[in-house]
Image (tube, grey):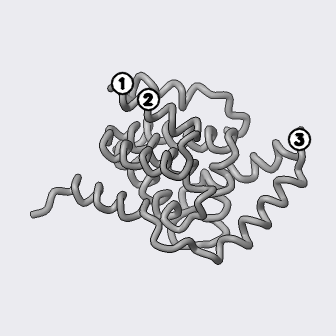
Amino acid sequence: MSNPASKTKDDLEQYLRVTKVDQTLIPFISKLAKQKAKSNHGEKLAKWGKTQFTFLSQRKVFNEYDEKTWTRLLVGLSDIPVRDALLCHHIEIAQISEDANRYLIKVAQNWAKVAQVAPKSFRAPICSCVAALMWQAGEGILARIAVDFALVADPQFHLAKLLNNALNSGMPAWEFRDAFTKITNPWS
């Protein structure tokens, strides 16, 4: 019988390795980036962020491959308020779930599938988020793998550096949970 943890580790490493960037995502990314750019600042940008958060926080979102959904995730996670709100949302949902760790691992695995086909400029945000979710699920080794992938994509990516420092220091995930859940989330 195989070890389920090693299977999860192998799966995560496989998901995070880019085998081939999905070129069909590029036009959707361009279109969504233009929509965001048109939003400029203020209320329109807040509305754009709320739309992304509302869509991406639904449980059914990742039931199957969908280019538009995956694009929304990549662009959404590259937007700090949307990214932080999604991390907060999923970590809070996990805390009231029957099996918190399993919930977080499932979300991280779904996001890792998206990371596998992501263009390089979108890999650091999604890999960092996968790391954060895995760490909060008690999977420090898997979090380390995801942080390493994020830092390869962008060695200066702030969330990846922050998670890297926390993991290197041996900080327990529960001590960092407030950083994810005590944010100002205008959409939940």
Q: Quadrant of the N terminus?
A: bottom left
Disc on res. 119: none
Nearest the viewer among 108 and 121 is: 121
Relative placement, left or right, of 109 versus 61 is left
Q: Quadrant of the C terminus?
A: top right
Q: Nearer the viewer, mark 2 or mark 3?
A: 2
Disc 2 marks which residue? 165
**Residue 40 image point, x, y percent:** 89, 46
Disc 1 marks which residue? 169
Amino acid carrying mark 3 in the image = His
Q: Earlier in the sequence, mark 2 or mark 3?
A: 3
Nearest the viewer among 91 and 152 is: 152
Q: Residues within 10 Å of mark 2 (few under 14, many from 20)?
A: few
Whether residue 98 is visible to the viewer of this picture, yes or no, is: no
Q: Secondary structure at mark 1?
A: helix
Q: Secondary structure at mark 2?
A: helix
Whether residue 112 is visible to the viewer of this picture, yes or no, is: yes
Q: How many marks?
A: 3
Amino acid carrying mark 2 in the image = Asn
Proximity of marks 2 and 1: CB atoms separated by less than 8 Å: yes
Nearest the viewer among 90 and 163 is: 163
Q: Quadrant of residue 4?
A: bottom left
